[in-house]
Image: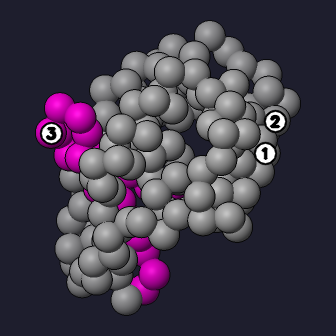
Amino acid sequence: MTTHPNVRTHFFVALQHVIDNIRENQTISDSDITSLLQLCGDDVVAALSVCDAKGTTKSIAPSGRVVYHVTGVTGNIYTCLKEEYFCNCKSFTNFVILKGSKFLCKHVLAVLIEDALGHCETVPKSEDIILSYLKQILPT
């Protein structure tokens, strides 16, 4: 499925507006949830479950490189890059990359929400550790 670039742009602008509102108010309002549901559908419920479980960790290197790890509801740990809206889960590969039917997965959405709320556990890591995380998600 090919998505028109304007649809993609509109999606991310609208999503960023909701995330900015969450960040500004430090809470998720009913209006925010409604907007997220309109944008992301059922992934919102799954993302909020991840948020409720406090399953998001933000690893940051001295250089400022950031990698997020999300513990999914199944217990699997996924690597996410927030600024790139990237996740190494199967759903991201199938629905975002291969089918193009979604713009992000529930893990990236959870990262966006948790980061906006300031709820991500932040863990300083060495540059080498962050690079090793990045190497793990690159194709070999």
| Left-right relation of 118 to 4 | left
| Residue at the spot 52% in from the left edge and 63% down from the top edge | 117
Which structural element holds mark 3? Answer: loop
Residue 80 placement (x, y as % from top left): 38, 51
Mark 1, residue position: 13
77 on left or right of 97: left
Work out how far the residue at label 1 is from the one at label 3, CA to CA, in angstroms. 31 Å
- Residue at the farthest left position: 75
Front position in the image: 43 or 132: 43
Mark 3, other Cα within 10 Å: few <14 / some 14–19 / many ≥20: few
Say whether residue 68 is magenta: yes
Residue range (magenta): 63-84
Tell me the amino acid under the disc marked 2: His
Measured as percent of width and height from the top left, residue 51 is found at 38, 48
Q: Are marks 1 and 2 in contact (CB under 8 Å)?
A: yes
Viewer-nearest of labels 1 and 3?
Answer: 3
Residue 82: give x, y in percent of width and height: 50, 56
Please name the residue that numbered disc 2 is placed on: 10
Asked if residue 81 lies left or right of residue 27, the reply is left
Q: Can you tell which mark lies on residue 75?
A: 3
Q: Residues within 10 Å of mark 2 (few under 14, many from 20)?
A: few
Residue located 60% across and 65% down the image: 26
User: Quadrant of the image for the C terminus?
Assistant: top left
Residue at the far front: name it. Answer: 30
Measure the alpha-carbon separation of dots 1 and 2.
5 Å
Identify residue type, mark 1: Val
Kindly state the secondary structure of the residue where label 1 is placed.
helix
Q: Mark 2 or mark 3: name the one nearer the start of the chain.
A: 2
Q: Is residue 34 visible?
A: yes
Q: Are marks 1 and 3 in contact (CB under 8 Å)?
A: no
